Amino acid sequence: MTVQDVRAFNRFYTNVIGALDYSRQLYAPYTLTESRVLYELAHSPRTDAADLRTELSLDAGYLSRILNKFEQDGLIERTTSHRDPRRRRVTLTARGRETAALLAERADESVGALLATVPSADRPRLTEAMRTVRTLLSDGRPPRREDVLLREPGPGDLGWIVARNAALYAAEYGFNADYEALVARIVADFAEDHDPHLERVWIAELDGRPVGCVMCVRDDAPATARLRLLLVEPEARGLGIGDRLVSAVVDFARGVGYRDLVLWTNDVLTAARRVYQRHGFVLAAEKPHRSFGKDLNGQDWRLELTGTRE
Amino acid sequence: MTVQDVRAFNRFYTNVIGALDYSRQLYAPYTLTESRVLYELAHSPRTDAADLRTELSLDAGYLSRILNKFEQDGLIERTTSHRDPRRRRVTLTARGRETAALLAERADESVGALLATVPSADRPRLTEAMRTVRTLLSDGRPPRREDVLLREPGPGDLGWIVARNAALYAAEYGFNADYEALVARIVADFAEDHDPHLERVWIAELDGRPVGCVMCVRDDAPATARLRLLLVEPEARGLGIGDRLVSAVVDFARGVGYRDLVLWTNDVLTAARRVYQRHGFVLAAEKPHRSFGKDLNGQDWRLELTGTRE
DNA sequence: GCGATATCTCTGACTGAGTCAAGCATTCGG
DNA sequence: CCGAATGCTTGACTCAGTCAGAGATATCGC
């Protein structure tokens, strides 16, 4: 049950945060909340009090008192905001920046001590996992299209294509190991020998991790390109990534002078089919076959690249 | 910088925990700390006050007062411990269990509301990431040899072999994409056609995720097997995984009747070489070559499988 | 067995982080 | 121009959590 997992994590992490502050000297002579305010100020030095309130969800009176203290200690200066005299603009003084840096340093030390218990080989996994938790929980903001980036494959990405194709089709359609063999063959052929001007692979990246791919290779027929291995991870669907990948292939194929673009798929892959249709592919042939441990309907689709460009 | 990542995560998660408690009704009529005590009691019903103190690191006086309140409310009963009359044994009453259940239910709801913002496709990633953070930070208990399991590859594992070989050798030795092509070729050949009685792949699994692999295939020479693609993830090194993988290959090859086991490696892979030596492999030939964008010394190693079995 | 010391618990006294409500100044919507 | 809303401040308060002392009992050295 996911809720229980999350609650267990909350209990655990409450202890972690508590343990970091064990000596009770971390924030002296300020409190955790004061130190959060100071941090916020140090990282966006020209802020209105109202922004601090919403950002840290503090009580207005509480914040006002905290800022009083900071002003007495010479950490900040308060002026009224230009565009709204009710608002107070808060700016850090040099002394305030010093203090913020001091607190940051202490926090660094404390966290460093915690991190020292983690083998350095594991640290990338730790930061990766923390980033995952953050992005998934951060107000559930759904990723936007602009967060997705298309790029060329780097080390390991071709293997990733094989792994994710095999795992996803096994999970979603029950394909057996033959499918992984097919994909591995396609990828190996590409990796071993391809003309970078006429053949290419794109990786769709979201928050630094691959979430989709597509390949464009020469076909046997003259002046014909073949689109292969279109894939979008379930968690990244609905962002138009499939469309962008297909567009990339179409544009590329047209740009380097192919006259036709073909692809082979199966009718069970309905989402993919709609993407192809949107880009103007038409069904050229359909044939039942038994592959990957399933009875399937193979489909050949074709898009003429000459003619009217929309 | 990892420390900064962790601190960012701490700030973030402080907000998450704060937000969960937003309505301020979560624990009413008790406080967070009281509710933690109640939780602890509900999950180990027969506890001494001293245990609670150490477990939750509470002030003795504070805990005493909390227990007073609980006793007045009829949630607990206090008796003196048998083995030490100074200690107080605390047991939940039926009413105490009810209250604990009620609080747990409210917390579940609150967490459930948070989780509702996470698309269900992402939830496995969330719990996985949380588990990773917990296991890495919780006392850094190093994994033990018994936690590692050798198994046959499942869907996606062959692709994983390609991906991790390529990524690791690129990171550790600067190999270029040619190496990924070579691995992809080897894996594709295996996936497409292999004799399961004479050729096999092993995946080493730690806590449910792959951390190592090795392959055994027929060689061109008669009655000769070839060991390929031995790999152990950095974070799983030092657990004897390499030895276990090589042992698996040696035992398998000997068991199915091969007379020789050969392998090709490069002298920069010193850790792997030591593994091979431990298993009795001897260096048969060495030859410089330029591959994968590097000048390397290729080595052929050989182990006779007939003769004295140790 | 006895004294010195440590441990467990409880209570009184206190601190101070955070909340609530009222009031003043200003902007916004009509 | 008026009522409502927003931003900030201050006074008054609550109550979570800390600290110190005291009583009871265990443990250790002798």
Image (spheres, coloured by chain):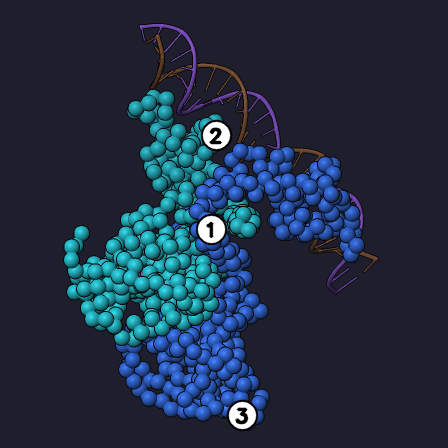
Chain colours: A blue, B cyan, C purple, D brown
**Circle 3 — which element?**
loop
Q: Are marks 3 and 2 in contact (CB under 8 Å)?
A: no
Q: Position of residue B129 (x, y in %)?
A: 43, 55
Q: Residue at x 56, y 49 (%)?
A: B4
* Image mark 3: chain: A
Q: Position of residue A277 (x, y in %)?
A: 47, 85
- Whether D18 is drawn above or below A289: the answer is above
Q: Residue at x 29, y 56 (%)?
A: B276
- Towards the viewer: D4 or B165: B165
Q: Nearer the viewer, mark 2 or mark 1?
A: 1
Q: Residue at x 63, y 51 (%)?
A: A55
Q: Position of residue A225 (x, y in %)?
A: 46, 86
Label 2 to label 1, Cα distance in Å? Answer: 34 Å
Residue under label 3, please give it.
Answer: A306
Residue under label 1, please give it.
Answer: A123
User: What's the residue type where badge 2 is placed?
Assistant: Asp
Q: Are marks 2 and 1 on the same chain?
A: no
Q: Dot 3: within a 10 Å radius of its alpha carbon, few (fewer than 14), some, or many (20 or more) residues?
A: few
User: What's the residue type where badge 3 is placed?
Assistant: Thr
- Towards the viewer: A171 or A202: A202
Q: Are marks 2 and 1 in contact (CB under 8 Å)?
A: no
* First in sequence: mark 3 vs mark 1: 1
- Whether B129 is drawn above or below B138: the answer is below
Q: Are marks 3 and 1 in contact (CB under 8 Å)?
A: no
Q: Which mark is residue B59?
A: 2
Residue A32 appears in which quarter of the rendering? Answer: top right
**Circle 2 — which element?**
loop
Q: Are marks 3 and 1 on the same chain?
A: yes
Report whether residue B288 is seen. Answer: yes
